Structures are given as C-alpha cells and as structure tokens.
Image (cartoon, rainbow, N blue to C red):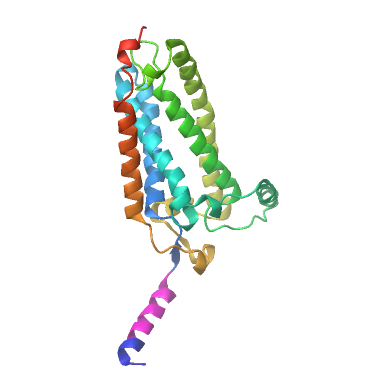
C-alpha cells in the first residue's frame, strides 16, 4: 500500500469515526413535507380570509395536488425509505407494533414505523380527496373552482359540502400526527422534526446498510415539473366555469 493510499484510508476511517448521523430522508421527501405544510396552511388561511382570497385558496389547492401526486410517484421510484414497499406493513405487524408500543417495547424502524406509515397513507389520501374536490366546488356566492364546468350546480354543491366536512377529519389527522411527533420527542427522545429538516438520524437509529447516499434530486425535479405541466394543461382545457355559475 502506498503512502497516498494509507493517507486516504486513514482519512475515511477518521470521517467514519467522527460521524454521528446517517441519512434517511432524501431532499425531495423533505421539500415535499415542508412544502405540503406550507400549502395546507396557506389553503386554511386564505379560506378564513374570505371570498376575496378565493383565487389564492385555489392556488394553494394546486400546490397540494402536485405535491401529493409527486409523493405517490416518489413512493414507487424514490430512495429507500421513501418507497412504499419499504415501510408499509400488513395489519398483523401494525397491530403487533401498536401492542408493543403500549407496553413500551416498540421495535425501532430507521424510516416510518407501521403506525407512521398508516398515517402517511391517511394524510395523502385525505389531502388528495380534499384538493380534488375543491376543483369542482364553489363558495356559494360568485366564485367557482376551475373544473366547475364539468359538473352541474347541484353536484358542485354536494362536492363543496364534502370538501368542507372532510376538512375537520383532515384537521384531526394532522393533530394526531403532530401529537405523535411530540410523543416521540418526549418519551423516546427522537427528534423527528430535526430529522425531516436535515434528513439525518443518529447512528444508533440507522444501521449502515439502511442509510441512503443519494437523493435522486434531478429525477424528483423532472417528476414535479411534469406533474405541474399536466395539471396546468387540465385546468387550461377545462370548460368555462364562470359562465356556468349562477349564485
């Protein structure tokens, strides 16, 4: 072994010795997560501000649709812990995890645990339904959704009602999610918020073969761009909504 090779080897070992964390969450997952938080908050605020902010409420809905659609695709082609088949568990394992959790004997998972995986699916499904329903809705005054032209006024009112009622279920799921994150911090000293910001977790929480080494950012960017273009095409080619409104 040459002196150069010995130096490089020593450098690698030194880096490994001083490393305290390993990467779990890729950059696209982290951008998706916090982007979705911002979009949902924006949708809530613009709704509360009244009908004059309806346009911005719709834009927030567009953001939710693109982000959720991206996450569903990323669950198929993303990095290790982003892929659904690497964190979704069957009913028996999920129930067993819940029982062990109540006993204080829960198994550790580098990525999502079974209950966390269930919450991911619940939130994605609810947000997808909520945002898509909003495309066909109206505010019962003079604003209508971009796809209102595809449905009758009566059916739009039905979809609008479901859109409003689903919000409370969605708010409950979000509150449960936040409580779970707080519980991890208080009772298990796991800072899940920090992990979703940095993408890293402590060495003891991530076996070396479970760490990721690439975020596939270019692939994620192409997927996001394609989804945004696709949604724009659908909206631009929808029947005129304003002409059919009668409130």
Residue 209 location (% of width, % of height):
51, 68
Q: Nearer the viewer, residue 216 or 123?
A: 216
For the point 38% across and 50% down, the residue is 28
Please, is residue 216 above or below residue 73 in the view?
below
Residue 10 location (% of width, % of height):
37, 84
* Span shown in magenta: 7-19
Please, is residue 76 above or below residue 209 in the view?
above
Q: Can residue 219 be seen at all in this image of the molecule?
A: yes
Name the dominant secondary structure of the magenta segment.
helix
Q: Nearer the viewer, residue 243 or 178?
A: 243
Residue 9 drawn in magenta: yes
Residue 26 location (% of width, % of height):
40, 55
For the point 46% across and 43% down, the residue is 72
Q: Nearer the viewer, residue 120 or 45?
A: 120
Residue 212 drawn in magenta: no
Q: Is residue 174 left or right of residue 8?
A: right
Q: Quadrant of the N terminus?
A: bottom left
Q: Can residue 175 be seen at all in this image of the molecule?
A: no
For the point 30% across and 37% down, the residue is 229
Q: Is residue 43 left or right of residue 92?
A: left
Circle count:
0
Q: Quadrant of the C terminus?
A: top left
For the point 49% across and 26% down, the residue is 167
Name which quarter of the figure residue 38 lies in.
top left
Q: Is residue 207 left or right of residue 2?
A: right
Residue 191 location (% of width, % of height):
48, 53
Q: Residue furthest top?
A: 247
Please, is residue 92 above or below residue 61 in the view?
below
Name which quarter of the figure residue 239 lies in.
top left
């Amino acid at each position: 072994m040459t002196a150069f090779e010995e130096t490089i080897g020593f450098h690698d070992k030194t880096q490994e010795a001083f490393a305290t964390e390993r990467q779990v969450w890729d950059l696209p997952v982290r951008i998706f997560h916090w982007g979705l938080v911002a979009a949902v908050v924006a949708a809530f605020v613009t709704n509360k501000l009244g009908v004059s902010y309806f346009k911005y409420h719709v834009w927030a809905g567009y953001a939710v649709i693109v982000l959720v659609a991206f996450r569903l695709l990323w669950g198929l082609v993303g990095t290790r812990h982003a892929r659904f088949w690497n964190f979704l568990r069957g009913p028996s394992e999920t129930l067993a995890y819940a029982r062990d959790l109540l006993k204080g004997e829960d198994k550790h998972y580098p990525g999502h645990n079974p209950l966390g995986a269930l919450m991911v699916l619940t939130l994605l499904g609810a947000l997808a339904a909520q945002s898509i329903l909003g495309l066909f809705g109206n505010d019962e005054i003079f604003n209508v959704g971009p796809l209102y032209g595809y449905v009758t006024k009566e059916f739009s009112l039905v979809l609008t009602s479901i859109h409003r009622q689903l919000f409370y279920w969605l708010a409950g799921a979000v509150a449960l999610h936040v409580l779970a994150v707080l519980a991890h911090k208080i009772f298990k000293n796991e800072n899940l918020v920090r992990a979703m910001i940095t993408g890293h977790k402590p060495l003891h929480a991530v076996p070396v073969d479970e760490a990721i080494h690439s975020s596939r950012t270019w692939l994620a960017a192409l997927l996001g761009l394609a989804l945004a273009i696709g949604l724009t095409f659908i909206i631009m080619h929808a029947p005129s909504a304003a002409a059919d409104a009668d409130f």
